[in-house]
Amino acid sequence: MLSFTGADAALTRTLLLFPAMQPAKTQLIHLSAIDIFIIVAYFIFVTFIGFYVKNASKSSEEFFMAGREMTAWIAGLSFMSANLGALELMGWAGSAYQYGILAAHAYWIGAVPAMLFLGIVMMPFYYISKANSVPGYLHQRFGSPTRAFSAISFAFMTILMSGINMYSMALVMKVVLNWDLNFSIWLSSLVVAVYVAVGGLRSAVFNEVLQFVLIWAGALLIPILGLIEVGGWKNLMRQIETNLGRTDYTHLWSPLGHFNQNPMGVHWTGVVLGWGFVLSFGYWTTDFLVVQRVLAAKNLRAAQMAPIIGAAFKMMVPLIVILPGLLALSVLPIHLLPENVAVATNGHSYNEVLPLMLVRYCGPGLIGLGVTALIAGFMSGMAGNVSAFSTVWTYDIYGAFLNKKGSDRHYVAMGRWCVLIGVLVSIGTAYLVQHSASIMDYALQLFSFFIAPLFGTVILGMLWKRATDAGGFWGLLSGTVTSIGLWVWVDRDPSALRYVALSPAAQGMAENMYRSLWAWIVCVVVTIGVSLMTTPRPAAALEGLVYGTTGVQAADETRWYGRPIFWAIVVAAALIVLNIVLW
Amino acid sequence: MRQKHSIWFFVGVLLLVYGVAICFTGLWELKYPLAQPPVLVQLHAPIWWGAILGLAGAVFVVRCAQKMP
């Protein structure tokens, strides 16, 4: 769950800022015997799958890349599921209650264009280069220093985020179910560690597909029953406008002409450049956590179709996340509050909207299914983190620099140990953030530190033949240093925010967005500048790595309706129609 | 070594188990109504939602079983 979206950040940060106050919260959900059966069955099932695929995960190619034999559907659903965590579900449902339908931008312009771009433009380079990871591609394109830098920064970021994700899950389970923090952390971590260490990426991917289905099975009933209760979509919109006395909660773009005309206080340029470009493209196209799932596809066509299938389902996620938040604005008899106010008054916060709606419509059995959906979301994110960490450590750090001559069996053993060690370090990180609220603030910067400049390096590497090894390395380094430097500057002198985020009134998300943008721009400018001053590689050395060289070709598919570009256009058209209808 | 069953088989099994369990819970509630029923309890969501999940699970299981080597 490396999606540093505003809602995730807000929910996680609030939970981390007020851990001591959480026990005072009222327990939202009480489980019956059938609910416990459903949850226990889930834990047993995911562990079983890990052992079931164990024999198919013996070589390094099988363990780290799932044998590169996943179908487009499995890779696509796994690609999306690795991101669809419970924080994502609960956080954005809360944002929909807080900001209205504007929250849907996170799923539409904030994800779909980048996913389609990955499938159509970038996937051929990743796939044909046979790179095992994003740092692995950078090794082929820019050399070892760039690989080392990106691998170390990714490993650091992944482990830290895995721990934060773990602790956040435990806190949510405490609020929702009154589960003990230690119990939640250790139980879920050990189950994930077992099934990923035993079955490798294949086990993680298979479980992510299972988790994806469970998330939908557990969450889809809420919008169905909610729409029945309010009398349909039009009535819902009418009731929200009547209840709130304003229309900006029910329109996607028309309130974005000015900062003061919408509940988010955001301008359309921020939505397009922030969500739609830097954050979204950086995350979906270069974060190995999600890209690894697509690299496991069985052929180029499957690898290209996987992100397109993922994009199609991503476009539907607002149905189970945003719609419940909107329905709550219409049907909940209580008024939800910002987290800090809710903590102080022992009321219910925006972030509790999904569990509240679950309790409203679901009885025994269905509640168990809904809670299982939340747990499945957390575990899919955690499995994504540890499997990606294991691969990058083994291939791009250990195998590339520490022990180049190990046998295939040795590297698989290293990968298995790496999963266990990664989970243990993540647990340590989880306990670390328990005692230090500022850790989460640091973690929220990681995306702008490492992913935003990485996107600049990768995209130039793929699209510009003239980019040199030195240009790639110094561009990535300078982008990262710029981002960290800007953060330090604002941290030391808060008035610097007016320069970094172009407004003294900018807050959290805006600061992250603009810092990411500056980091990306510096990375691109330095890469171009240094490349023009250094000698490029001969064209023969770039085959299959860069646009315009031989070796890069589209997926082999002659039927027009079987081509990835056709389905990408269909998904893009659906996205445009949705945005126009809800304008 | 390739595994014998695809992931869709396991998805089917879990949906089938969950669907049957939830459907029977809904039927049980017809005879023993809940003390604190949820909103729209008269729609008997556990019965039809459980049936849908169970049916979907059964379809996955049967189709995957047919494709087994």
Image (cartoon, coloured by chain):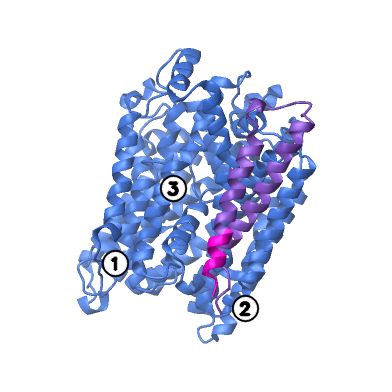
Chain colours: A blue, B purple
Q: Which residue is mark 3?
A: A313
Q: Residue at x 72, y 37 (%)?
A: B27
Chain of the residue that carries numbered disc 1 in the rendered image: A
Do marks 2 and 1 both belong to one polypeptide chain?
A: yes
Q: Main secondary structure of the magenta part?
A: helix
Name the secondary structure under disc 1: loop
Q: Residue at x 48, y 78 (%)?
A: A400
Residue A433 appearing in the image: no
Q: Which residue is mark 2?
A: A413
- Of marks 2 and 1, the one in the foreground: 1
**A161 and B45: which is toward the camera:** B45
Q: Which residues are magenta?
A: B61-69
User: What crowding class fits label 3: few (fewer than 14 Cα within 10 Å), some (14-19), or many (20 or more)?
Assistant: some
Tell me the tag on residue A555.
1
Under mark 1, the amino acid is: Ala
| Residue A203: quarter of image | bottom right
Residue A54 appearing in the image: yes
